[in-house]
Amino acid sequence: MRVGEACYSCLLDQGRRVLELCSSDGRLMRRVEEFLAERYSPDAVPALLGTELHRFLREITGNPDPFREVKREANRTALRILPHARRLVAASGDRFTAAVRVSLAGNLMDFAVYGSNTCEEALARALEDEPAIDHTPRFRRLVERGGRLLYLLDNAGEIALDGLLIEELQRTGVRVTAAVKGAPVLNDATLEDARQVGLERLCRVVTTGGDVVGVDLERAPAEFLEEMERADVIVAKGQGHFETLDTYTGTPVVFLLRAKCPSVAGTLGVPRGSGVVLVKNA
């Protein structure tokens, strides 16, 4: 996916948020503006340009993980609401669909976009919120075949709710491997976050090997690309994975996301804020 009209202002806002979190030097915002002006082009992939921006932000602020405390708070909040989410899934007539909806609700726990935790409010509506694109039946048929599934996780906090969907996937007989970022970027989950929410007790957890928002197929480590090749199904959570894997033509991919920005919503042809369960390559 290429950048849209709203991407430039969104990236500027991300830069401003990072500087608010970890720097009092007002001159740095000008450097962010110059950085984006130099690198922004119609052919840029939003998530990959965002990766470059956040590397630059870590460099100029001297902070290797600006969102660390934000992520910890997200994990604590998610663990607090997890029992309620578990009860919602257990009480539903269709555990698999309910777990997918709860996972989508968890995708609203994106501090980089919202600046606050809205997941508790979204969770109350999760089971009634029909995705604008809903390939859940196709998703179910894919995993009922068994085999290996690679789950590309998105943000800290929401990964606790993804754990409920991973449990339902395991009930179908698939062997789940979850992937987190190999180094901090934005509020994306790392191994530290996986440990904080207990994900390593649930399934095997690997890393993407780096700090890329989404997946950069041209530069990803061979070990991670092998994980993708070995998988029979890939679940790709969040906008960053859609932005970088929308043209991927290999293993069947299930995109689970909220279309939070106009560019992603426009590409998908759905209203902004809509839930999306999109199966490709199958």
Image (cartoon, rainbow, N blue to C red):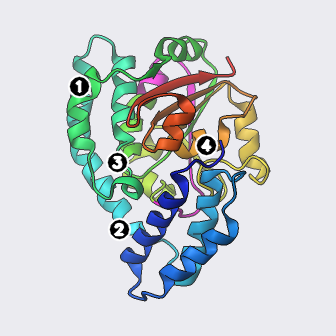
Q: Which of marks 3 and 1 is in front?
A: 3
Q: Are marks 2 and 1 in contact (CB under 8 Å)?
A: no
The residue at the point 55 percent across, 59 percent down is 8
Give the mark count.
4
Residue 69 — which label? 2
Residue 73 x, y percent position in the rendering: 29, 60
Residue 149 x, y percent position in the rendering: 60, 29
Q: In the image, is 175 to the left or to the right of 165?
A: right
Classed neighbour count for the residue bearing mark 1: other residues with Cα under 10 Å, few (<14), some (14–19), many (≥20): some
Instruction: Write the start and end of the magenta stretch as one range.
Output: 167-186
The kind of residue on which mark 2 rests is Glu
Pointer 3: what residue? Answer: 109
**Label 4 vs 1, first from the N-terminus:** 1
Distance from label 3 to label 1 (Cα)?
18 Å
**Label 2 vs 1, first from the N-terminus:** 2
Pointer 1: what residue? Answer: 88
Q: Nearer the viewer, mark 2 or mark 3?
A: 3
Q: Quadrant of the N terminus?
A: top right
Classed neighbour count for the residue bearing mark 2: other residues with Cα under 10 Å, few (<14), some (14–19), many (≥20): few
Classed neighbour count for the residue bearing mark 3: other residues with Cα under 10 Å, few (<14), some (14–19), many (≥20): many
Disc 1 is placed on an element classified as: helix
Disc 4 is placed on an element classified as: helix
Q: Nearer the viewer, mark 4 or mark 3?
A: 4
**Residue 248 occupies which quadrant of the picture?**
top right
Q: Which of marks 4 and 1 is in front?
A: 4
Distance from label 4 to label 1 (Cα)?
31 Å
Pointer 4: what residue? Answer: 243
Q: Quadrant of the C terminus?
A: top right
The kind of residue on which mark 1 rests is Leu
Disc 3 is placed on an element classified as: loop
